[in-house]
Amino acid sequence: MSRILVSQNIAGYLDQAGKILNYEQKEIEKLKEFDLLAEIPFNLILENGHELNLKAYRVQHNNWRGIYKGGIRFHPHVTLEELGNLAFLMTFKNALMDLPFGGAKGGIAIEPTRLSRIELENLSRAYVKNLQGILGPKKDVAAPDVNTNGQVMAWMLDEYQKITRNNSPAAFTGKFVEYGGSEGRKEATGYGGVYVLEKVLEKESVHFSEPLTVAILGFGNVGSHFAEAAGDLGLKIIAVSDIGGGIQNSEGLSWQEVKDYQNENGSVKDFPGAKNISLYDLMECEVDILIPAAIENMINQENAGKIRAKIIVEMANSPVTAEAERLLEEKNIILVPDILANGGGVVTSYFEWLQNQKAEHWSKDEVLAKLKERMERAFEKVWEAKQTYGVNFRLAAYIVALKRMLE
């Protein structure tokens, strides 16, 4: 067994859940151990002949409930410690969603936008070559994460099948549909968050505007599909942002028009009929629901006091710091945690893995119906724990997940 330092924030929730459930601390400490920390050096030769010295990382946290499952990210700030925390979170997210998976995460510290298509393909294939024997449909199933997508998964799957000489579509999820991917996968995380939000709105007695207003920090795949599903629910999107800036229109924004504009222009900035705003302005918007859907630690001690939303739904991983969460609780802002809210991605990855294993192909409607049922079931368990133990949503989610891990 290997250990790295799990963040005090995540470990703290686990410790609290353990005390509430009267588990011995030694049982909790076992869950802070990691099964594998792989850090494999390799070289990538660029088209101009320059050579990059890189490392292929893969962290496997725990497989008590099943094989490892987790994404692969290509980002300059990838570290073993970051991946360890994300793998740890994945273990408990999988348990909360009642999936037969343990937690894993992987990546390479690189800026992929500076690579040509050929270089990106070579990088993707090199990752699989260097992790031979670690990945596989019955060992560790990888998926897209930050800066990786269906194309990267297609290259990785092809390389894996060349190495193993087996047809193994279940080795990677998040693939294009024509490569064995699942219908509804690209919508899954955003839609899953709205399914959870719908249940929160049913249970929580808060005075909202009519119609409910939403601001979304991060209008990528997750944020835009959250906006789509929220619009179908009758919610009004009044502000969104991406890496290029933010926009606001108090009369409401069409998610599809904004997405089309973003695809054409590279950013939502200067969208016709909306005013440009900063990310800080967006966070401080007077809205019912704020959706952080971009990066970690977006909401922190510096800006939490200025937030005026009534509900925050964490669609990114760890977008709210522990200090900020305490400030938000003092303001009676409801926080729906990432471990619950953004679980739709891994749930649909499980559906894809299952379809590949059975050589089946489910329709989009079937996938989304199964996703809604799974998300609502997870929410009801969390709500029950929240009421039983008098805790917030995040701690209730860890209580449910920890019970499943140890029982």
Image (tube, grey):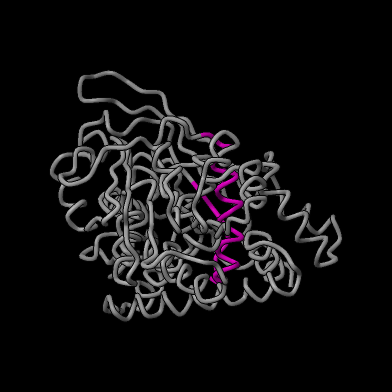
Closest to the observer, 311 or 220: 311
Residue nearer the viewer, 391 or 187: 391
- The quadrant the C terminus occupies is bottom right
Res. 162 visible in picture: no
Residue at position x 41%, y 67% in the image:
194
Image-based side of 34 in relation to 29, left or right: left
The answer to if 97 sits in the magenta stretch is yes
Query: Looking at the picture, how far across and down is residue 257, in whole percent?
Result: 17, 55
- What residue do we see at 32% from left, 57% from top? 237
Percent of width and height locating residue 375: 48, 73
Magenta part of the protein: which range?
Answer: 79-105
* Dominant secondary-structure state across the stretch colored magenta: helix
Residue 295 position by quadrant: top left
- Depicted 278 relative to depicted 389: above or below: above
> Does residue 243 appear in this view?
yes
- Relative horizontal placement of residue 12, taking residue 379 as reference (left or right): right
Q: Is residue 292 left or right of residue 147?
A: right
Q: Is residue 166 above or below residue 114?
A: below
Question: In terms of image quadrants, where is residue 173?
Answer: bottom left
Q: Is residue 133 magenta?
A: no
Question: For the view shown, which residue lies furthest in the left direction?
Answer: 264
Q: Residue at x 52, y 57 (%)?
A: 310
Q: Is residue 285 shown above or below 22? A: above
Residue 236 drawn above or below residue 286: below
Residue nearest the viewer, comparing 332 with 69: 332
